[in-house]
Image: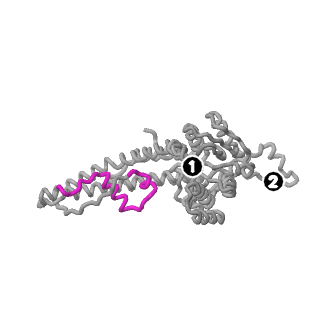
Amino acid sequence: MPDVQALVNDFLNKLKKRKIEGSQATSRQTAELLRSVISQQRVPYNNQAGALIDAVKAVGEQLIAANPVELAVGNIVRRVLHIIREEDLSLTTAAMAGLNLSAVSDDEDDEERDDLPVLSAAVVAAAARSTLRPPSLQTLLEDMPDSAAIPHTSSSGGDSEGKSKSADKSSRSRKLKHDVIEAVNELIQDITTCHEQIAEQAVEHIHQNEVILTLGSSRTVLEFLCAAKEKKRSFRVFVAEGAPRYQGHLLAKELVARGLQTTLITDSAVFAMISRVNMVIVGAHAVMANGGVIAPVGLNMVALAAQKHAVPFVVLAGSHKLCPLYPHNPEVLLNELRSPSELLDFGEFSDCLDFRSVTGSPLLHVVNPTFDYVPPSLLVCSSLTRCLELRWKENVDGEILEILAQFITSC
């Protein structure tokens, strides 16, 4: 078995040096690292969940501090902590239900016993999650069985109760880590297949002979557009190049290689071309709790253009990009500056030094931000515009449409 601390240090170095490209790869590797931490963590006989939570928290704090801009790391750490609490709660509730059901009084008739419901561990766990804890993203996305009420029965003391408690503790000791690791494996699988799951909805959003605008390069957007192409949708794609890294050039080449009609434009031409566009489809770096989106630089300009021309604005993001933090939180770092060499070569930069001064301070400063923040107001208006278009097609009452149109205009 590899040393956990060595794995943590290696991953920390990759995060600090920005060696991992993309939120999906970062999320998957974070989940895999935490799975290794959990599998090799020695837990005491009592408070096993507390020991696992402390271990994950200790590693998670280091990972978040190594790259505060990569919010997906913190999202995965929180998801894993939630998994540990949920599995511990499920096992505890199942054990309590087992004791209650096994402690039915012997004075009851057989017919009365037959009337009592037989609860499985899954049903008990679902009931516990739905009643003892507030709803969360993970519980909302899970396919939970119908919850059932746990019958209140009298308990009897004696050796049988002591043996049952001892057996339950032993069972939980063997089962908690196994269940947590299985749940983390499911999380890793969801992260790995997020592109395919999002692409399944492409036909519902892209229609025949539409013109789609996107910016930069996103694998989620690529698979989304190609899925629509495979469903015999005929459409055209405008790709803004995404300077200064020009990731849009890569996306345009991949789209052409897959047979999509593609037009490459400069970022400054977005406002000039937006009137020809039917929909904007873009990826995201993170989706904040207020509905705002952190995305590649230049996307706020695209959102403003879409709002100005009433063009639907669609953001594609996997669940690992949903962040429970607000952009005004002090622990949220919305941006980081990349190397000036992407804009200006070092030789060209050296020509801009003021050699008349003693220090030779530069007269030219280069700022190269990585991300844009798109406020939720732009996204809400775009989605309402799409809703308005659909309502027009359905011939809904004109007064409602007029109210919606006034609201969109006021936004």
Q: Looking at the image, which is closer to me, 261 or 298?
A: 261
Question: Distance between the Cα atoms at labels 1 and 2?
Answer: 44 Å
Q: Looking at the image, which is closer to me, 262 or 333?
A: 262
Quadrant housing the C terminus: bottom right
Between disc 1 and disc 2, the foreground one is 1
Q: Position of residue 332 (x, y in %)?
A: 58, 58
Residue appearing at x 20%, y 57% in the figure: 116
Q: Looking at the image, which is closer to me, 322 or 185?
A: 322
Q: Which residues are magenta?
A: 114-143
Q: Give me the disc on residue 316.
A: 1
Q: Position of residue 347 (x, y in %)?
A: 80, 42
Q: Which quarter of the figure has residue 161?
A: bottom left
- SS at mark 1? strand
Q: Position of residue 142 (x, y in %)?
A: 41, 51
Dot 2 corresponds to which residue? 361
Q: Is residue 246 left or right of 81 when viewed as pictured?
A: right
Q: Which quarter of the figure has residue 21?
A: top right
Please tell me how many numbered marks the rendered image carries.
2
Q: Position of residue 280 (x, y in %)?
A: 63, 50
Please say whether residue 333 is visible from this viewpoint. Answer: no
Please say whether residue 240 is visible from this viewpoint. Answer: yes
Q: Is residue 170 left or right of 409 when viewed as pictured?
A: left
Tell me which label, 1 or 2, sits earlier in the chain. Answer: 1
Quadrant housing the N terminus: top left
